[in-house]
Image (spheres, helix red, strand yellow):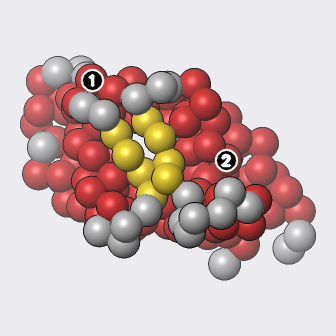
Amino acid sequence: MPRFLVSLIANAIALWLTTLIVSGVKVDAFGTDDGVLSTVLTYVFVALIFGIVNGIVGTAIRIVAFPLYILTLGLISLVVNALLLLLASWVSQLFGFGLTVDGFGWAVLGALVLAILSAIIGAILRPLARRDR
């Protein structure tokens, strides 16, 4: 359970930083007020949606598209991650708030920045979860 929470927090922080860096990726907070709690919960909710989409749909796509990964030397992962980000955006918008991506180009850039930031933040936070055991 701590590993899941660390991953969720790392993805939420990485998503927040991605929205600050990439102008085509935005998060619309839940509710009408601009409270900190609603904003934080929105980022955690969107990170949870992205984790579920990436875990279920992303794994299936990666298994099916494995020959394309080999053929393109892994560059197809940029397209797959962008499509997963767009799918997470669509799913979160079904709730009336959440992630908004302006287009496919922004999705590619956003997915790249999100992956890099998530890896860095996860590398920093993972030892903290292991230390509690």
On the picture, is 21 further left or further right than 64? right
Crowd tier of the residue under label 1, counting other residues whose Cα lies within 10 Å: few below 14, some 14–19, many 20 or above: few
Quadrant, the N terminus: bottom right
Q: Earlier in the sequence, mark 1 or mark 2?
A: 2
Residue that appears at 55% across and 36% down: 19
Where is residue 125? Give x, y as percent. Answer: 77, 50
Type of the residue with mark 2: Ile
Outermost residue on the right side: it is 132
Residue that appears at 49% across and 25% down: 22
Crowd tier of the residue under label 2, counting other residues whose Cα lies within 10 Å: few below 14, some 14–19, many 20 or above: many
Q: Secondary structure at mark 2?
A: helix
Where is residue 128? Give x, y as percent. Answer: 85, 57
Decide: is 56 above or below 64: below
- Residue linked to disc 2: 13
The answer to which quarter of the image holds residue 56 is bottom left
On the picture, is 4 further left or further right than 67? right
Q: Which mark is residue 105?
A: 1
Question: Which of these two is toward me, 10 or 103?
Answer: 103
On the picture, is 67 further left or further right than 87? left
Type of the residue with mark 1: Gly
Residue that appears at 23% across and 30% down: 104
Residue 91 in view, yes or no: yes
Q: Secondary structure at mark 1?
A: helix
On the picture, is 117 further left or further right than 64? right
Where is residue 79? Give x, y as percent. Answer: 22, 32
Where is residue 93? Give x, y as percent. Answer: 33, 61
The answer to which quarter of the image holds residue 44 is bottom right
Question: Which of these two is toward me, 107 or 9?
Answer: 107
